[in-house]
Amino acid sequence: MFLEKLKHIKAFILDVDGVMTNGMLLVTESGEFLRQFNIKDGYALQLAVKRGFKIAVVS
């Protein structure tokens, strides 16, 4: 029954800070801000897109 409900999912909306990152903000020597992402999250998003899901990332 649970898996049947999942079949209707067509998109994922994800927050970036604290969900897809560890919450750290890195500052380069030139003052540019960078965030670290877990490579597993990147692979999961890539797989979701390949399988036809829409992805929205909220910052």
Image (cartoon, grey):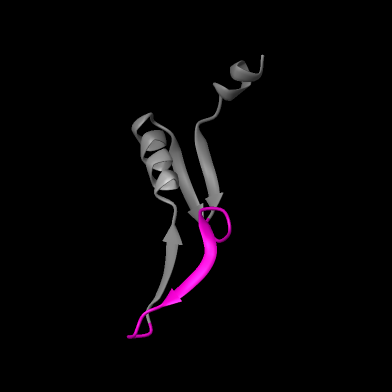
Judged left or right of residue 59, residue 48 is left
> In the displayed structure, does residue 2 sit left or right of residue 57?
right
The one nearer the camera, 58 or 37, is 37
Residue depicted at 34% across the width and 85% down the height:
29
Q: Quadrant of residue 8?
A: top right
Residue 47 higher or lower than 29, as above or below: above
Magenta region: 16-31
Residue furthest to the right in view is 1
Q: Quadrant of residue 55?
A: top left
Q: Is residue 38 left or right of residue 59?
A: left
Q: Is residue 1 above or below residue 41?
A: above
Q: Nearer the viewer, residue 34 or 53?
A: 34
Q: Position of residue 47 (x, y in %)?
A: 37, 35
Please name the residue shown 50% across and 31% down the image. 10
Residue 59, visible in the rendered structure: no
47 in relation to 38, above or below: above
Question: On the image, which quarter does residue 48 sit in?
Answer: top left
User: Which quadrant holds the N terminus?
Assistant: top right
Which residue appears at 36% of the width and 80% of the height? 28
So how many labels did they put on this image? 0
| Front-most of residues 49 and 44 | 44
Residue 7 seen in this snapshot: yes
Check residue 24 for magenta coloring. yes
Q: Is residue 49 magenta?
A: no
